[in-house]
Amino acid sequence: MNLYSTKHTVPEVDFRTALFQGLPSDNGLYMPDHIPVLPESFFQDLHKMPFTEQAFQMAHALIGDEIPAEDLREIITKAINFAAPVINVAEDRYCLELFHGPSLAFKDFGARFMAGVMSWYLKEAGEKIHILVATSGDTGSAVAQGFYNMPGIEVIILYPSGKVSLTQEKQLTTLGQNVTALEINGVFDDCQRLVKSAFLDEDLQRKINLSSANSINIARLIPQTFYYVHAYGQLKHIGRPMVFSVPSGNFGNLCGGIIAHKMGLPVERFIAATNVNDVVPEYLETGIFAPRPSVATISNAMDVGNPSNFPRILELWGGDIEKVREKVFGLSVSDEATEEAIKLLYNKHKYLACPHTAVAWLGLEAYFESTNSDALGIFLSTAHPSKFTDVIEPVIGQSVEIPERLQQIILRDKESVLMESDFGAFKEYLLSR
């Protein structure tokens, strides 16, 4: 597997280099030089395969022999040891639940796969690394859980102070050991800027072995292809086209679905459903990509004003906006509409959804209202509703049951390092470790 930069100004690298380097030196994003197309028989036989076998076939096709097949199979078996069920919510409407992993969020897929792959390489080489992660919510907790106590790996998580839910904050600030949380006085985009700046700082690169576990890392992106194929395998017996509505912030999740499509997965359309941080829906409508500071919403994991994965989506269609528009339908929704969707799903369909999941539902409904499609609609549920009780309970007028493992985390003491969004201070902190 060779990978190139989306800015096309630096040489291609192998998978191991892209994994540990995170970002190319030209500040682009790594992309596979070739997207393999799986045989039609693979998609026909999906229902006969366990989820881990489906995932292995896809990962092996992408990565090739850089990791021996049996080692890769073992990594995936350990990492993807939880379900991703498709739930029938309403007529022709299905929810793909991605929150059954240890941190109760879809980020577990990417974080656990990446931790397994990194651990395999580090064990082979006897090296140590520092992982830098910017999070707007669930990435941090998933990475913290996925890399917790991994030998040779130190994890530093940056999150915006006061802009993640209490539960999310506790999940990433209470582990300790090899996991440190930096509470940044700013917004998510500031956290992301600090991480990107660190990777582009040659002085830091010489002194510290840095890597990233954000969705900008190719190893986070690969496992995000798995569950689209798994959902298709669960529903293909119905014999209808399928539409996927993806709650979108940094756009890694949608990018994973598009790569799965490029690998042969039949998909009628993808829906990029955002909150009022609508840079991509605006781009699809106007052709103008205009990043701006993010706005805080109740679907906080999607509060991204400059979605870093979107260049990958453009790259998959050669930068042709018309081709993107043919396959991606964009929609943004307000907090008020999100709350109404939570209420409707709960009262009418007896389904309890987190705010991000509700945004995806609204995207699906908007798509079918504007088309004559007879497809099955699949909306992605990216987090367990118990992580957003402060939003959900006032809306539905009921208490939300919190899983025992989450209750225990909430009771722990928070440990974080408060820091301004200044790169000089951040660099000094890294060098002091």
Image (spheres, helix red, strand yellow):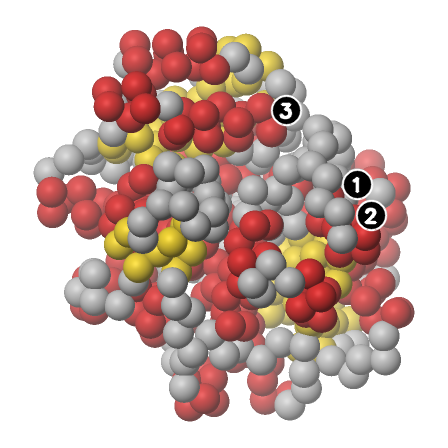
Q: Residue 45 carries which label?
A: none
Residue 216 on image: x %, y %: 46, 44
The one of 88 and 324 positioned closer to us in this rendering: 324
From this viewpoint, is residue 53 visible? no
Q: List the residue tagged with mark 3.
A: 187
The image position of residue 305, as x and y in percent, is: 68, 36
The secondary structure type at the circle numbered 2 is loop
According to the picture, the residue beneath numbered tag 2 turns out to be 333
Residue 362 in the image, given as x and y percentages of width and height: 80, 57
Horizontal arrangement in the rendering, residue 286 relative to residue 255 (left or right)? right
- Residue shown at the point (81%, 67%) measured from the top left: 367
Dot 1 alpha-carbon crowd within 10 angstroms: few under 14, some 14 to 19, many 20 or more: many
Q: Which amino acid does label 3 sit on?
A: Val
**For the residues marked 3 and 1, what is the alpha-carbon distance in whole angstroms?**
15 Å
Q: Is residue 242 above or below residue 226?
A: below
**Residue shown at 42% from the left, 69% from the top:** 35
Quadrant holding the N terminus: bottom left
| Dot placed on the residue nearer the N-terminal end, 3 or 1 | 3
Tell me the residue at 64%/90% (across/down): 239
Check disc 1 and report the residue beneath it: 276
Label 3 neighbourhood size at 10 Å, few (<14), some (14-19), many (20+)? many
Check disc 3 and report its element: helix, strand or loop: loop
Depth check: 320 or 90 in front? 320
Q: Quadrant of residue 94?
A: bottom right
Please name whichever residue, 383 or 261, is drawn nearer the observer in this view of the structure: 261
Mark 2 touching mark 1, by CB under 8 A?
A: yes
Tag 2 or tag 3, which sits nearer the N-term?
A: 3
